[in-house]
Image: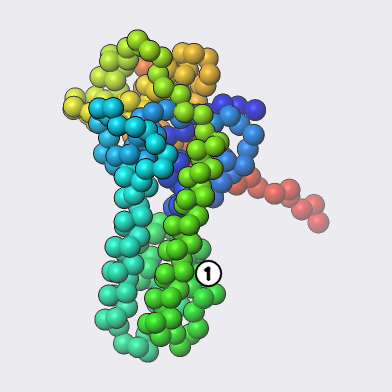
C-alpha cells in the first residue's frame, strides 16, 4: 500500500462524471492506498477558483465557490447553448447522433469520454426524437452529474487526509523556484507552486513521496526539475492508474 498526495484536477476528475479523468480517478479511489491533499488544493477545489492568500476564509468542504462551483455553472451554461444550437436545426436532423455531436461540441467533451455521451443519448432518445425529448434527456443527465458530484465530494471529504503545513515552516525559496519553473517568470501567486510545497511538507515529514496529477504540461513535464527542488515524484494519473490489461487468452 502506498501514500499519495492528490492535485486539484484529480479531485475534480473524480467529482464529475463527464470529466476526462473519471475512469482513472475511480481506479485510484478504489485502491487501499492512503490519500492525502493539502489546504491549497482544498481551497482551490471548494472555495476559490483562482486561489490566492486565504485571508482567514474557512476551508469548508460544503462550499462550492471554487472549481466545483465553476464546473456546475458551466453545466447550466452549456446546456442552454446546446438547446439553442439544436433549435436552429431542422426537425428532421434531430436524432441521437446529432444531439451527441452538438453536446460534445458545446460541452467541450474530450475524446476519452465521447463514447459515454454517444451511448447515453443512443439509450435515451429515439431516432425521431423531438426537442422536448432532448431537453428532458439533457436535464436528466445534468441532474445525474450534479447529484453524483455531491456524493463524490462527500466521499472525498471522508477519504482524503487534509494536512496543513507545519507551523513555522518556510517554503518561500521553493515557491519562488517553482513559480519561475512553471510560469516561466515570477508572478504574485502560482497555485501549483503552493500545491507542490504542501506536498513537499508531507514529504519532509515522511508521510508521502508521490504527488498524483492530471496536469501533464506544467507538473509532469517538469517532473525532473520539481524532483530536484522538492524531492517529490510527480506521477501522471493516466499512467499510474490506467486500466490494467486482462489476462491474455492462450487459445
Secondary element at image label 1: helix
Tell me the residue at 28%/75% (across/down).
85
Q: Is residue 93 above or below residue 36?
A: below
The image quarter in which residue 65 lies: top left
Classify residue 86 as left or right of residue 28.
left
Q: Residue at x 63, y 45 (%)?
A: 244
Q: Is residue 193 above or below residue 13?
A: above
Left or right side of 185 for 98: right
In depth, the one of 232 and 43 nearer the eye is 43
Number of numbered markers: 1
- On the image, the x and y values in percent for residue 59 come to 37, 33
Q: Position of residue 177 (x, y in %)?
A: 28, 19
Question: Relative to 183, is 2 on the left or the right?
Answer: right
Report the residue at 47% width, 28% height from top.
162
Mark yes or no: residue 249 visible. Answer: yes
The C terminus is located in which quarter? bottom right
The quarter of the image holding the N terminus is top right
Residue toward you, 123 or 216: 123
Image position, residue 71 (x, y; %): 35, 52
- Residue sitting at x 37%, y 68%: 103
Asked if one can make out residue 219 in the rendered structure from this viewpoint, the answer is no
Depth check: 6 or 166 in front?
A: 166
Residue, far top: 168
Q: Is residue 109 left or right of residue 161?
A: left
Name the spot of residue 66 as percent of width and height, x first: 32, 43
Q: Residues within 10 Å of mark 1 (few under 14, many from 20)?
A: few
The figure's colour scheme reads rainbow
| Quarter where residue 62 is shown | top left
Image quadrant in which you'd find residue 185: top left
Residue at the disc numbered 1: 119
Amino acid at each position: 500500500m502506498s501514500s499519495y498526495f492528490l492535485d486539484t484536477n484529480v479531485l475534480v476528475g473524480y467529482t464529475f462524471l463527464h470529466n476526462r479523468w473519471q475512469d482513472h480517478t475511480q481506479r485510484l479511489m478504489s485502491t487501499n492506498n492512503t490519500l492525502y491533499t493539502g489546504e491549497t488544493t482544498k481551497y482551490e477545489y471548494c472555495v476559490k477558483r483562482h486561489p490566492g492568500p486565504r485571508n482567514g476564509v474557512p476551508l469548508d468542504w460544503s462550499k462550492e465557490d471554487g472549481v466545483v462551483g465553476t464546473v456546475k455553472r458551466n453545466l447550466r451554461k452549456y446546456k442552454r447553448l446546446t438547446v439553442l444550437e439544436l433549435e436552429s436545426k431542422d426537425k428532421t436532423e434531430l436524432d441521437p447522433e446529432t444531439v451527441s455531436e452538438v453536446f460534445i461540441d458545446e460541452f467541450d467533451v474530450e475524446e476519452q469520454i465521447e463514447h459515454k455521451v454517444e451511448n447515453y443519448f443512443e439509450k435515451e432518445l429515439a431516432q425521431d426524437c423531438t426537442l422536448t425529448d432532448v431537453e428532458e434527456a439533457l436535464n436528466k443527465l445534468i441532474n445525474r452529474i450534479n447529484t453524483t458530484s455531491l456524493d463524490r465530494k462527500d466521499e472525498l471529504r471522508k477519504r482524503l487526509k487534509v494536512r496543513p503545513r507545519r507551523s513555522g515552516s518556510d517554503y518561500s525559496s521553493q515557491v519562488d523556484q517553482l513559480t519561475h519553473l512553471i510560469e516561466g517568470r515570477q508572478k504574485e501567486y502560482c497555485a501549483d507552486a503552493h500545491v507542490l510545497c504542501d506536498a513537499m511538507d508531507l514529504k519532509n515529514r515522511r508521510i508521502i513521496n508521490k504527488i498524483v496529477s492530471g496536469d501533464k504540461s506544467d507538473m509532469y513535464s517538469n517532473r525532473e526539475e520539481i524532483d530536484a527542488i522538492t524531492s517529490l515524484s510527480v506521477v501522471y494519473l493516466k499512467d499510474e492508474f490506467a486500466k490494467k490489461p486482462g489476462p491474455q487468452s492462450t487459445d
